[in-house]
Image (spheres, grey):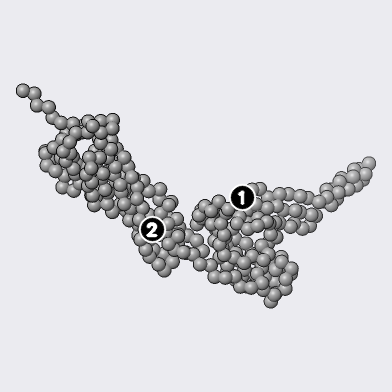
Amino acid sequence: MLNRRIIVIAATVLTALAAPLNSYAEDGPAGGSAHCGQFTCQVEVDVPGQAGGQAGGSGSTGGTGSSDGGDPSDEKVCSYKLADPQPQAGSLDWEGHEPGDGAVYEQTCGWGGVADDTIVRMVWLANPPPQETVDPAALAQRAVDSMALLGPDVASPRAAGKYTVGVPMWMWVNQSATTYGPNSASASAGGITVTAIAKVSKIVWAMGDGASVTCNGPGTPYTSSAGMAQSPTCGHVYSKISGSARNGKFPVTATSTWTINWQGGGQAGQLTEVRQTNVQVAVGEVQVVR
């Protein structure tokens, strides 16, 4: 009786081992599937930016690609390094070819310069891949886009404040990495890293009464000890009230110019970005009672 049970169990195990097994890869940066038999597995990987799945990447030629949407963050950049030493004859990396027929390379593909969106695999190529070229200026712009630069954080004039004709108005802004700088960021692709540093170089104030004031700094905060003096760095004096303006307030626009210096990939350059902030300012006049 005991022998019969052992035979039944053994037969069950052999049947399970002989049955084909199928499994499928979960979605990720590279989709695809894995089909497994009793002793072997064939893995197919779909690399974003390429048409269809390829077993081991046969026939890849390298270069850059982008999604149909044209989003720069979807741009694929691949680099190649000759495998040294080359795999032994019969290795799956040869994809059915023999040593001496082309060569096996380590392929690294990334998207948008994000380290987490990188795939490294071994591929066989009949001919050496073309040398990848990356525009450092494009990487600099990508770095700037990641900074999320904003318009001026206006501290004065205040929307809730009340100002007077003929009385000097002091204008200044709060300083932070995203509203004034300095702000820095880097972007990488194809083995090149570009670093950009941004800072506001000037703020142009459109005062709403037809006047424009250019300030080359953040302005000077007002203190009571200054009395009726004008701001030493950034100010304006209204000569008329805002009563006739829409909502009884002057629309003030502060426009900051960000100057960005970048370097990397053996190059250097400068970019410019412009941001705005709007505020409504009420200006009245002093009534003298006799």
The structure residue drawn at horizontal position 13% and vertical position 37%, both measured from the top left corner, is 166
Per the image, label 1 sits on a secondary structure element best described as loop
Earlier along the polypeptide chain: callout 1 or callout 2? Answer: 1
Report the residue that reaches farthest toward the front: 244
Report the residue that reaches farthest toward the left: 290
The percent position of residue 16, horizontal first and vertical second, equals 83, 48
* Quadrant in the picture for residue 187: bottom left
Residue at the spot of label 1: 28
Number of numbered discs present?
2
* Quadrant in the picture for residue 206: top left
The structure residue drawn at horizontal position 61% and vertical position 55%, both measured from the top left corner, is 48
Q: CA distance from mark 1 to mark 2?
A: 31 Å
The numbered disc on residue 177 is: none
Q: Amino acid at mark 2?
A: Ala
The structure residue drawn at horizontal position 50% and vertical position 57%, both measured from the top left corner, is 113
Number of other residues with Cα within 10 Å of mark 2, as a class: few under 14, some 14 to 19, many 20 or more: many
Q: Looking at this view, is 285 or 194 the one in front?
A: 285
Q: Amino acid at mark 1?
A: Gly
Give above or below for 61 relative to 179: below
Residue 117 appears in view: no
Per the image, label 2 sits on a secondary structure element best described as strand
Residues marked 1 and 2 touching at CB (< 8 Å): no
The percent position of residue 28, horizontal first and vertical second, equals 61, 50
Residue at the spot of label 2: 196
